[in-house]
Image: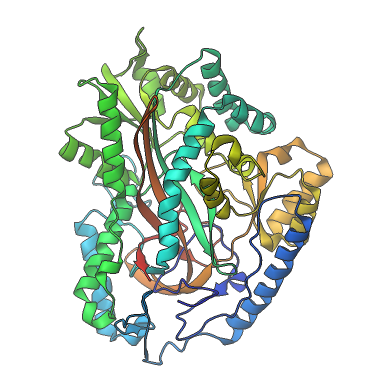
Amino acid sequence: MGSGCSCWSFSSAISLSLSFSDRVLCYSPAILLPNYTKPRSFTSNPTSETLFRGYLQKSHQAMKSESALSSSSFVNLNSGKVEEEKTPDESSAKPIISDLCDINPKLFQQMVYDALVWSSLHGLVVGDKSVQRSGTVPGVGLVHAPFALLPTFFPQIHWQQACELAPLFNELVDRVSLDGKFLQESLSRTKKVDAFTSGLLDIHSMMLEINKKEEIRLGLHRSDYMLDAQTNALLQIELNTISASFAGLGCVVSELHSNLLNHFEKNLGLDPSRVPKNDAVSGFAEALAKAWNEYNNSRAVVLFVVQTEERNMYDQHWLCTILKERHSMTSIRKTMAEIDAEGELQPDGTLLVGGQPVAVIYFRAGYAPSDYPSESEWRARLLMEQSSAIKCPSISYHLVGTKKIQQELAKPNILERFLENEDDVAKLRKCFAGLWSLDYSDVVKNAIERPDLFVLKPQREGGGNNVYGDDLRETLLKLEKEGSEERDAYILMQRIFPCASLAYLVQQGVCHQDHAISELGMYGVYLRNKDKIIINDHSGYLLRTKVSSSNEGGVAAGFAVLDSIYLT
């Protein structure tokens, strides 16, 4: 695909984003290819002042180039041209239409119509937020999930890299989770200023005090990445260790795209086999089933911990259905308040909920302060942690996924504390973006001067929480002026500059075209019983696409659409 930027697509996607003027526009190399110079790899070593200044200078240069591109280098959408692409092995490929506007309007409308029908028939649905009971009663107020009309082009070399990283991050999470002192010390200052983190740490501390051992440990994780246009590097945005969503609907989108490419192959010139098979929900179900087997109680159920109102319930029901139909397992859905009311702990550690023994607890709630509106929810979380049920995640796995721990692990020589293999350490460190606490005054100063190059992150999950641009500058200035300990509730992260490309986003039955960016989430599954590793592998993926002018990227939060990959 050429040097510089290699992620041109019909639809591109997600998460930490810049304003549109700050985006790299990246089209098919046959149409346009930005000529970037590759800087040195940017590490998170806060002592590398020279390297950091070099990164700032390179970023300034890239942004100047982006401005020039955005003002004069758009593709002529009415050109009617068919562009030639080369596959990675340089063999001839079928012609690829440079833009869907080149297609006959009636054919385009037919594609959108067929996609909407297919989505409705195959369970690519969510609850309609305009319908009052859509988040509580199944089958009420259904609407198709937002999706990209066609898959996003993504380099196979970076796809393989993400697949290889998943087992390494799985093992890292497990190793770090066992170091209670590291978790407590790393989050000690955050605890003083963040009541939610404090509550989680209190439960973790109680488990340490009673020497609670989680001999069977289950992790269903998702590591999110963006492909940085300036360095052509795959950089990690965050690691999700609790409620890694869309394993269900993400698979359905991949099937939708394969179906469309099959049906319209002659018109599009796209090979359906280049959309990778997405087995995320099957992998999650298999891991839950094997964990249930390890617990060794045939009467026990899998407990889904859910929010009181959940419009994304069908993503969860895909998993429940596969557990039932393929593994003959019973699952129940309970809110944390219901668990507090119905739960009881037996003398042998067995958790009963509504009189049913629980083998595995799968959290699809409990990751945000809003999930704990009263003491009832905190009692339920403590009760579950005290039990012998397998937690996904345990309180320690949950804490490993916090932003602060992500930043601590990016410090020099910290990974080596948990992993012995030098090659594994190098592979993980290669994908780390710049991460700093607010203790580093030089970095904070640079962020105040150039807030467009940074993201300010609180210890929150779920989308819509990060601080950007002028708001970032104002927040930092306020924290500096007040000398407040509140600064310990945040970390600073290097802002990633992904490619932006024309995309076709289908929302509420309407398809619209916009410039978009993409974020790849790679699922990982991990199951261990004492010293025996039963599963450690990648398990499918999630691609999310959003317009490039949006800062946030959550689908459930309303910022993005579901997408899939077309390997190049």
Is residue 371 rendered to the left or right of residue 91?
right
Viewer can see residue 314: no
Which residue is depicted at the point 36% across and 84% down?
101
Residue 312 position, x and y percent, is: 35, 47
Which image quadrant: the C terminus?
bottom left
| Relative horizontal placement of residue 476, taking residue 500 as reference (left or right) | right
Tell me, what colour scheme is on the image? rainbow
- Asked if residue 231 shows in the view, the reply is yes
Quarter where residue 485 is shown: top right
User: Going 60% across and 84% down the picture, which residue do you hit?
Assistant: 71
Q: Residue furthest top?
A: 347
Q: Quadrant of the N terminus?
A: bottom left
Q: Is residue 375 above or below residue 567?
A: above
Depth check, front residue: 72 or 410: 410
313 shown above or below 548: above
Judge left or right: residue 84 versus residue 468: left
**Left of 411 or right of it: where is 281?**
left
Position in image of residue 141 (x %, y %): 28, 50
Q: Nearer the viewer, residue 234 or 107?
A: 234
How many labels sit on residues?
0
Residue at the image point whose x is 74% and y is 62% from the top: 450
